[in-house]
Image: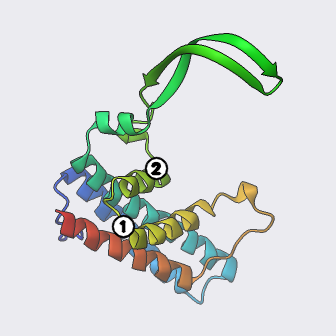
């Protein structure tokens, strides 16, 4: 097997998965630029490349999150306060009541393994691991990937080499960010 593109990733399984995703992208790139295929087919190849690029970004960010934060810290971040044993003391109108009860802290149900790209970005931003500049770029790649859900669109978007280059640029920046965090 060739040398890894992610040698700084200590988790061997994650490193192998990242390399396989990267190899898949490299395999698809010529198809996305080939004159053999029509624009719809090339756009479909671009979509897949964008999805795999976002997958790599998500995995790299998860690696940072996993190394720096415990499961309890994640649950704590997503915890909330809930009113228990609520008693209505007085009803003012249909929209307002005066109540009594006990507030209890309920740990979040989102654990590390269930976090999506948006949640990982939000968490790392809130913990000041990711700064505003990188956060904006991460939001771009998150949106590029999420646009692929066609159920909410009135028209199917066409993806191009420019979209791939944008995703690659962001992925490169994330890769360098994670390498430096090591």
Vertically, is 121 above or below 76? below
Q: Nearer the viewer, residue 13 or 165?
A: 165
Across and down, in percent, residue 135 comes to 43, 66
Give me the disc on residue 131: 1
Quadrant assignment, res 99: top right
24 relative to 5 in the view: left or right: right
Q: Are marks 2 and 1 in contact (CB under 8 Å)?
A: no
Residue at position x 16%, y 55% in the image: 10
**Quadrant of the snapshot with the N terminus:** bottom left
Specify which label sits upstream in the sequence, 2 or 1: 2
- Above-or-below relation of 106 to 128: above
Residue in front for this viewpoint, 147 or 96: 96
Q: Is residue 144 left or right of residue 5?
A: right
Q: Which mark is residue 119?
A: 2
95 with respect to 175 (left or right): right
What secondary structure is marked by label 2?
Answer: helix
Whole-angstrom CA distance, mark 2 to mark 1, is 15 Å
Spot occupied by residue 170 in the image (x, y as percentages of width and height): 41, 75
Specify few, some or many for label 1: CA neighbours under 10 Å numbering under 14, 14-19, or 20 or more: few
The residue at the point 40 percent across, 71 percent down is: 134
Q: Nearer the viewer, residue 115 or 1?
A: 115
Task: Measuring from the top left, give residue 119's x and y in whole percent.
Answer: 46, 49
Residue neighbourhood size for the residue with mark 2, other residues' Cα within 10 Å, grouped as few (<14), some (14–19), many (≥20): few
Q: Residue furthest right?
A: 94
Q: How many numbered marks are there?
A: 2
The residue nearer to you, when weighing 51 against 91, is 91
Q: Residue at x 44, y 32 (%)?
A: 79
Q: Nearer the viewer, mark 2 or mark 1?
A: 1
Residue 156, picture quadrant: bottom right
What label does residue 65 carry, if any?
Answer: none
Whole-percent x, y for residue 154 in the image: 81, 64
Q: Name the residue rendered at 39%, 39% in the picture.
A: 77
């Amino acid at each position: 097997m060739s040398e890894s593109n992610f040698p700084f990733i200590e988790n061997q399984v994650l490193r192998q998965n990242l390399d396989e995703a990267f190899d898949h992208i490299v395999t698809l790139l010529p198809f996305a630029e080939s004159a053999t295929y029509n624009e719809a087919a090339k756009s479909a190849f671009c979509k897949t490349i964008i999805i795999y690029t976002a997958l790599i970004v998500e995995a790299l960010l998860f690696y940072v999150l996993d190394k720096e934060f415990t499961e309890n810290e994640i649950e704590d971040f997503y915890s909330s306060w809930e009113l228990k044993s609520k008693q209505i003391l007085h009803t003012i109108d249909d929209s307002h009541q005066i109540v009594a009860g006990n507030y209890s802290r309920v740990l979040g149900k989102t654990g590390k393994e269930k976090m999506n790209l948006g949640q990982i970005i939000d968490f790392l931003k809130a913990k000041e691991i990711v700064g505003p500049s990188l956060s904006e770029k991460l939001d771009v790649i998150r949106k590029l990937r999420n646009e692929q859900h066609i159920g909410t669109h009135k028209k199917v978007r066409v993806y191009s080499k420019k979209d791939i280059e944008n995703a690659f640029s962001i992925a490169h920046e994330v890769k360098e960010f994670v390498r430096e965090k090591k």
